[in-house]
Image (cartoon, rainbow, N blue to C red):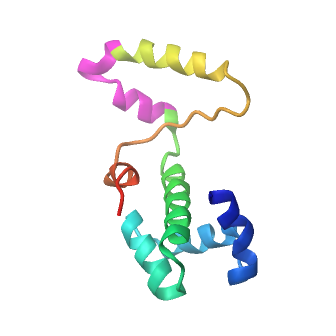
Amino acid sequence: MGEAIARNLPAKTGRTFEQWVELTRREGLSSRRERIAWLKTEHGLGTVTATFIAADAGRAQHRGHVRRPDALLDAMYGGDKAPLRPISDELAKAARKLGRDVELTVGRHTSESADAGSSE
């Protein structure tokens, strides 16, 4: 369904999916719900379309916050969690063997991440 939305957006709105994501990201809204509401009220998009765009814009914002993934991993697996780091490293190594289409990312858990699975 997401592919159909992206394919039809230019004809319906004059903007591509990527342009909507960038526009939404630049608005700087912190939560997925805020982004959806903004897309619906300010731009008249439907709920499903707004949800797809808001989710992608949230991922784009989140990726931009982790400038030094190794430092974040060091912080995440410091202290009492240090014994878990080798497990994480082995999982990452196994994931890299799955193919070039697999992307490994490092991030923090945020309320945005928790929101992603909820329905509205």
In the rendered structure, the answer to whether residue 73 lies left or right of residue 80 reads: right
Quadrant for the C terminus in the image: bottom left
Tell me: residue 67, above or below residue 103. Answer: below
- Labels in figure, total: 0
Q: Could you tell me which residue is drawn at 72 percent across and 72 percent down?
A: 8
Tell me: residue 20, above or below residue 116. Answer: below
Please check the rendered image and state whether residue 78 is part of the magenta-colored stretch, yes or no.
Answer: yes
Quadrant in which residue 32 is drawn: bottom left
Q: Nearer the viewer, residue 83 or 38?
A: 38
In the rendered structure, the answer to whether residue 33 lies left or right of residue 95 reads: left
Q: Nearer the viewer, residue 101 or 89?
A: 101
In the rendered structure, the answer to whether residue 6 lies left or right of residue 84 reads: right
Picture coordinates of residue 118 (x, y %)?
34, 54
Tell me: residue 63, above or below residue 21. Answer: above
Quadrant in which residue 14 is drawn: bottom right
Q: Residue furthest left?
A: 80
Picture coordinates of residue 23 (x, y %)?
59, 75
Q: Nearer the viewer, residue 29 or 73?
A: 29
Q: Could you tell me which residue is drawn at 60 percent across and 67 percent down?
A: 21
Mostly what secondary structure, the magenta segment?
helix
Q: Could you tell me which residue is drawn at 49 percent across and 45 percent down?
A: 66
In the rendered structure, the answer to whether residue 58 lies left or right of residue 11 reads: left
Picture coordinates of residue 78 (x, y %)?
31, 24
Q: Could you tell me which residue is drawn at 52 percent across and 86 percent down?
A: 44
Quadrant for the N terminus in the image: bottom right
Picture coordinates of residue 56 (x, y %)?
55, 58
Please check the rendered image and state whether residue 79 is part of the magenta-colored stretch, yes or no.
Answer: yes
Q: Which residues are magenta?
A: 70-83
